Image (cartoon, rainbow, N blue to C red):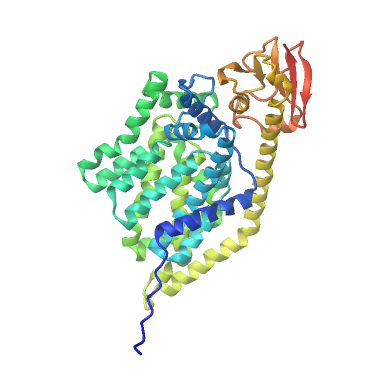
Amino acid sequence: MTAVAAKPRLAPSLATRAAALIPLGALFCRLLVRAGFLNYDTAYSLLWGGDLAHGRVPDTSIPLAPTAHPLATLLGLVLTPVGDAGQGAWVVIAFLALGAVGWLAYELAAHWFGPAAGAVAALLILTRIPLLSFGVRAYVDIPYVALALGAVLAEARGPKPRLTLALLALAGLLRPEAWLLSLAYVVYRRDLRLVPLALAAPVLWGVYDLALTGDPLHSLTGTRHGAEVLERTTGLTAVPTVMPRRLGEIMRADGLFAAAAGGLLVLAFMRRSARLPIAAGFASVAAFCVLAVAGLPILGRYLLLPAALLAVFAGAGAFGWLRLPKDHPWRRRWSVVGAATLLGFAALTPAQASRIEDLHRSMALQQDILADLHDLTQTPAFKQGCRPVAVPNHRPVPHVALWTGIPPAAIVSAQLERPARGLYIDPANRRVERNFTLDPRDPRRLTAVVPPGLERVAANRSWVLFARC
């Protein structure tokens, strides 16, 4: 009998790895933080999507209304038919976006520097506190990072210019930095036929703003105004001091050391592999600077994309030496550097674990406060139609609106107005006052005085409800 040669085992396809690793990454993040809920901005996106689903024009003129991101509003519209389950579905999507960031960091590092480098990159980025914090609160910045990294991967494995720009266009309906990345990519490709696709996101966003508000630049001016009210840092002159500090807060010392070592070694000995990730990193930082010039706030979450790319180089710092020829004079030296980076990770793991536990406690506290607020809105007083509804500041407005069906414009902040009748939700203790503000710089703290003449009708461990109908 003639022996039949065994067929070589094929590596899992990209789609197969995505289907397996994205849910795994999402579960990993869920187990780390053990909490998940909608933040202020995302709650408004769900409300505005519901408005569109019911044929209403979303009201973006509400005091301290967040920026209306078109893709987030579209997701809110899609989730409206499932009712209250839409909030839970959005949280699931948020965790899947975290998983996607980890998977894409793995794929990018593995593509250039090997699977071991990919594992380091994914584990590093998925254990960074800011990424986890914004992810479990369902900020749109996390899916933006995933889409932008997907565009880099499409280019690395392609090139596939139309797919790259399509992913950047979707990202550009969440964050305007993607517009600049798209234009930079067209310049890099030197193909004018790609210009319409590169301009799709800013044009669609302008049309969206025009339809909702009558002003195609409403998101720009509204975000500027919000930055002024909340006294956020703005301007290009602040970038040199703010950006390194924020990147350091995301990556921590071990991540920065590994990324710096990896970047320098790759640039010295694997320059061809370094061109695309270095270009992507510089482009993302340049986009951040352009937004600063435009007067938009300089926030740490806007640097999550550069941080994810730094994680790729951190993977290279640890295991990039495996891609050098065995007789390369720097292979052994690089392996020593890699061992030092791994020792750095190991040495700081207890401190990072402590930070993650602190994050869990903080997020669990906020989730509990939100759950108590939800329970309060289900009491009979809300169902009797006693209006208006007053809250101590703007933070509870979109959540109360989601749970009760009351339009956000009909929910007043007691910092601006103290109605003599209706319902008033008051914090039950200092724990809520400290932990349930809209922004650390929010001048409107949860300390408004309950209007006179209102009677206490319900309470729980976080909130007290007063009424006078």
Q: As displayed, is residue 70 above or below residue 112?
A: above
The residue lying toward the viewer, choosing from 376 and 436, is 376
> Would residue 262 be visible to someone looking at this image?
yes
Q: Position of residue 422 (x, y in %)?
A: 69, 13
| Quadrant the N terminus occupies | bottom left
Q: Residue at x 77, y 23 (%)?
A: 458
Q: Position of residue 468 (x, y in %)?
A: 74, 12
Q: Is residue 272 left or right of residue 389?
A: left
Q: Is residue 390 above or below residue 175?
A: above
Q: Is residue 449 left or right of residue 234?
A: right
Residue drawn at 55 percent across, 26 percent down: 230
Q: Is residue 188 above or below residue 425?
A: below
Rendered location of residue 237, percent (x, y) = 43, 35
- Quarter of the image with the C terminus is top right
Q: Quadrant of residue 385?
A: top right
Taking depth in this image into account, of 197 and 243 the one nearest to the observer is 197
Q: Position of residue 404 (x, y in %)?
A: 63, 24
Residue depicted at x 21% and y 41%: 193
